[in-house]
Image (cartoon, rainbow, N blue to C red):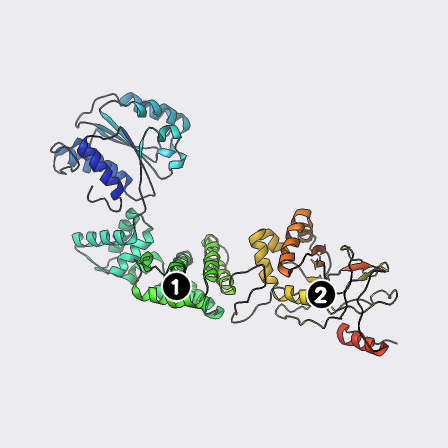
């Protein structure tokens, strides 16, 4: 039991039970893979059957201990429940459990992956678990205890095995290296221990793989080469790109990793773990949580934590965590990582207006044009007289808002636009709101993704144009009927309208339209925008300057 690493809460209890003769008839060992469940069960079997001693410490020299070590002990029955999971297998076990042990004092049944047993098999095992023969002991091992029926759990003493901390794994690997007579750098052993993620079996297997690599001394570079991981400097450099809002540097770093053939999945995991360290420093200033990291790395994390706020760090962790499952394949495997980098640099998105995180090259959200205000309509105008200029075709252009006429308008409920219909006229636009949505459209889409989902965000990505008045937001979806109908559904429309209201700071309705330009229309006779002018010439100049009108006659 002294050689079991990282499970003192289990071994201490078992040693006391052996010393006092209070060994239970059935145990349940649960926990992650490779944490010592089956090994502890075999040690318990040796302690119960040791021919030289009775108690907590088997001698490891008597015939019984040697037979258990070599896997030839007849009274130690190991059953793989994954392949022996039927009720017939359990009935066979139940029929044989009554026979006395042939060599030792007890017959020990170790049932591995016990959660794989069928419901009928569990039911057949209940009576035997509750009242086993005096010479029988059961040890059930599982990685998924929640799949075991409560009737079985209540008949066992349960021990939960934990993931082994990195320092303890590294120390045990150092002990193995010393006993086996080969050298290993401390950084290499820590890298192996961290890669094992609390699993001692995986750590020992990786160390053996490194020895097969042919090195007399296991180095960090060799471990990174075998694992496909990248250096800590590359991880810190990417986080530097995030904290310094340097998109180009981050994208070039990812491209270099692709050229080198590094594992992007492993790299993304390292970035998430590194950002976790930055988050812990920001939240607690407690370096004891980062005990496995070098002092230089912790100092660098402190510098990076000072550059960005806590919300930005949390947002970056979410971005890279969301990209991790998408890195498994695809035509461009690095694309999810690149998108995560850009999203992380943009920073967290709030429903209210928030300061933008500058990027190396600002990217406009979509090609949405801001509209100039519509001049007053004195009478029915000819068809096309009120047409607005086409939407900008350049995704990078952020249009400037035109001066707003100094008047207020009362609006009717949103009406589907019918260009050329003499019964309706266009309502004046709120240029400040148009400009806000135009420049911060990407931020609003991120809010939609958080509140609604990716489908709604993707649908709004197809918006070609928008118009905003004091109480209505009109979105034009081009000829994409599918996405227009998706957003126009009553439930979705209400949610998006609520998000728009909170984003703009006032209640607005949402009108989804087809076509390349968005219109908000009012019936003829409703109050229209008025322009303070000094006469017809001023109004004509306003139309030519702001509406690209041409004097025909």
**Residue 142 coordinates in the image, percent (x, y):** 34, 37
Q: Kindly report which numbered mark, 1 or 2, lies closer to the viewer in this rendering.
A: 2
Residue 156 horizontal side relative to residue 421, left or right: left
Residue 156, visible in the rendered structure? yes
Front-most of residues 338 and 444 = 444
Residue that mark 2 sits on: 430
Front-most of residues 516 and 536 = 536
Q: Which quadrant is home to the N terminus?
A: top left
Residue that mark 1 sits on: 235
Q: Label for residue 388?
A: none
Report helix, strand or loop for mark 2.
Answer: loop
Residue 2 horizontal side relative to residue 110, left or right: left
**Residue 196 coordinates in the image, percent (x, y):** 32, 51
**Residue 259 coordinates in the image, percent (x, y):** 42, 65
User: How many numbered discs, if any?
Assistant: 2
Residue 195 horizontal side relative to residue 247, left or right: left
Front-most of residues 278 and 118 = 278
Place residue 54 in its image quadrant: top left
* Discs 1, 2 touching: Cβ within 8 Å: no
Report helix, strand or loop for mark 1.
Answer: helix
Q: Earlier in the sequence, mark 1 or mark 2?
A: 1
Place residue 252 in its image quadrant: bottom left
Q: Residue at x 25, y 22 (%)?
A: 133
Label 2 crowd bin: few (<14), some (14–19), many (20+), radius 10 Å: many
Q: Residue at x 69, y 53 (%)?
A: 484
Place residue 434 in its image quadrant: bottom right
**Residue 446 coordinates in the image, percent (x, y):** 57, 58
Q: Check the image and report above or below for 484 versus 358.
A: above
Q: Check the image and report above or below for 49 versus 409.
A: above
What distance separates the C-alpha of mark 1 from that of mark 2? 46 Å
Front-most of residues 500 and 226 = 500
């Amino acid at each position: 039991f002294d050689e079991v690493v990282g499970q003192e809460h289990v071994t201490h209890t078992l040693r006391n039970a052996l010393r006092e003769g209070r060994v239970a008839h059935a145990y349940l060992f649960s926990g992650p893979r490779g944490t010592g469940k089956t090994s502890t069960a075999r040690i318990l079997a040796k302690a119960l059957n040791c021919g030289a001693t009775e108690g907590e410490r088997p001698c490891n020299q008597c015939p019984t201990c040697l037979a258990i070590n070599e896997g030839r002990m007849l009274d130690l029955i190991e059953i793989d429940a994954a392949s022996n999971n039927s009720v017939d297998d359990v009935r066979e076990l139940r029929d044989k459990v009554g026979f006395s042990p042939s060599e030792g004092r007890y017959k020990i049944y170790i049932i591995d992956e016990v959660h794989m047993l069928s419901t009928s098999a569990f039911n057949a095992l209940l009576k035997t678990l509750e009242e086993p023969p005096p010479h029988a002991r059961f040890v059930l091992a599982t990685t998924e205890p929640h799949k075991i029926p409560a009737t079985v759990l209540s008949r066992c003493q349960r021990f939960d095995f934990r993931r082994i901390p990195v320092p303890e794994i590294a120390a045990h690997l150092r002990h193995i290296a010393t006993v086996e007579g080969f050298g290993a750098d401390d950084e290499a052993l820590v890298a192996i221990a961290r890669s094992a993620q609390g699993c001692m079996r995986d750590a020992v297997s990786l160390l053996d793989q490194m020895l097969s690599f042919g090195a007399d001394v296991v180095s960090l570079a060799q471990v990174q080469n075998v694992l496909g991981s990248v250096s800590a400097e590359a991880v810190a450099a990417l986080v530097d790109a995030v904290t310094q809002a340097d998109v180009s540097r981050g994208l070039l770093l990812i491209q270099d990793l692709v050229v080198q053939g590094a594992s992007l999945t492993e790299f993304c995991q390292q970035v998430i773990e590194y950002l976790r360290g930055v988050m812990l420093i920001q939240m607690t200033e407690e370096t004891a949580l980062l005990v496995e990291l070098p002092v230089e790395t912790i100092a660098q994390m402190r510098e990076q934590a000072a550059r960005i706020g806590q919300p930005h760090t949390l947002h970056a962790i979410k971005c890279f965590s969301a990209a991790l499952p998408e890195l498994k394949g695809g035509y461009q495997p690095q694309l999810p990582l690149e998108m995560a980098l850009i999203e992380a640099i943009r920073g967290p998105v709030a429903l209210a207006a928030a300061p933008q995180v500058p990027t190396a090259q600002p990217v406009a959200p979509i090609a949405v044009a801001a509209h100039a205000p519509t001049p007053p309509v004195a009478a029915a105008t000819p068809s096309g007289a009120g047409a607005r200029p086409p939407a900008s075709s350049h995704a990078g252009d952020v249009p400037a808002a035109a001066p707003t006429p100094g008047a207020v308008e009362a609006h009717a409920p949103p009406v589907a636009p019918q260009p050329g219909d003499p019964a309706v006229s266009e309502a004046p636009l709120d240029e400040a709101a148009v400009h806000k949505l135009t420049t911060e459209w990407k931020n609003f889409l991120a809010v939609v993704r958080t509140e609604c989902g990716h489908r709604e965000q993707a649908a709004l990505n197809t918006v070609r144009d928008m118009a905003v008045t004091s109480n209505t937001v009109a979105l034009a979806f081009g000829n994409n009927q599918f996405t227009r109908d998706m957003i126009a559904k009553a439930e979705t429309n209400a949610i998006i309208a609520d998000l728009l209201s909170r984003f703009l700071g006032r209640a607005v309705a949402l009108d989804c339209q087809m076509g390349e330009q968005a219109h908000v229309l009012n019936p003829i006779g409703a109050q229209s925008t008025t322009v303070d002018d000094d006469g017809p010439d001023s109004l004509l100049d306003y139309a030519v300057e702001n509406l690209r009108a041409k004097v025909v006659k």
